[in-house]
Amino acid sequence: MRTIIMRRQVSILTIILVLNFLACSRSVGQSKNNRIDKDTTFNIFGDKAYFLSFKIIQEKKDDDPHFGTLTLTHKINGKTDVLLKDTVEFFMPLLQLKDFNNDQTNDILILNTSSTRSVWTHHLYLVDNKNHKLIPVKNFEELYNPEFDSKNNIIISTAIYSKIFYSFYRIGTDNKLINLGHGFEGDMTEADDAKYKNAIKSITEKD
């Protein structure tokens, strides 16, 4: 990756594809780099009394979807309170811990769908450590291959079909998804780099 970054001639598309390849190459059951693809329970909010459980309740058969549950519980004095329990549909069981709202706290990203061109969509739950809450982000499933640019606090969506379609988002203080505009259609050449830089510049100049 260092060679790719230093050369600067390689298009953004190439970088995205390399990152996706590295992410997909890990074996099933591996939890390295905050990736979980099996039933699991772990502490959340930095508090030993709160637990988040990810459990598969229906395995994939042919083209049928997976289903699973995401459950937030609080255990104290021998009592367990269920604070949230969502049933989620997903292409395959893959939960990742990534920050998407720039609060330096990993959020919960669950793979939702995947196309033949590896266009992935996800469910996103924001982790609010201060208030001990897990907040689902409405319509996040409509973003394609979302990646977070922490420097500029921008979520980049890239849909790869015959061309590549870029769009840009941010999660606001009300935890809602904001379309930042300046999306564009790329042709999978180095010209995409200039368009991308111009879009980011236009967005950050408004901040």
Image (cartoon, rainbow, N blue to C red):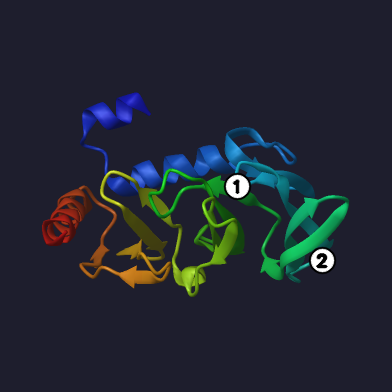
| Residue 205, quarter of picture | bottom left
Relative placement, left or right, of 150 versus 71 is left
Q: Residue furthest front?
A: 77
Q: Nearer the viewer, mark 1 or mark 2?
A: 1
User: Which sits in the foreground, 125 or 130?
Assistant: 130
- Residue 35 place in picture, x, y as percent: 62, 42
Q: Is residue 16 above or below residue 171?
A: above
Residue closest to the eye, 157 or 180:
180
Q: Residue at x 75, y 40 (%)?
A: 29
145 on left or right of 6: right
Name the quarter where the N terminus is drawn: top left
Q: What residue is at 28 percent from the left and 31 percent from the top?
A: 5
* Figure label count: 2
Residue for badge 2: 61
Whether residue 114 appears in this view of the structure is no
> Mark 1 touching mark 2, by CB under 8 A?
no
Q: Residues within 10 Å of mark 1 (few under 14, many from 20)?
A: some
Amino acid type, residue under disc 1 in the picture: Phe
Above or below, 168 against 54 in this view is: below
- The image shows residue 144 at horizontal and vertical percentages of 45, 63
Residue 152 pos. (x, y %):
26, 49
**Which quadrant holds residue 170?**
bottom left
Q: 125 above or below 11?
A: below
**Mark 1 highlights which residue?**
45
Whether residue 51 is visible to the viewer of this picture, yes or no, is yes
Tell me the tag on residue 196. Answer: none
| Percent coordinates x, y for residue 48 in the rendering | 71, 41
Taking the image as shown, residue 42 lies to the left or right of residue 10, namely right
Residue at image coords 33%, 70%: 178
The residue closer to the viewer here, 201 or 7, is 201
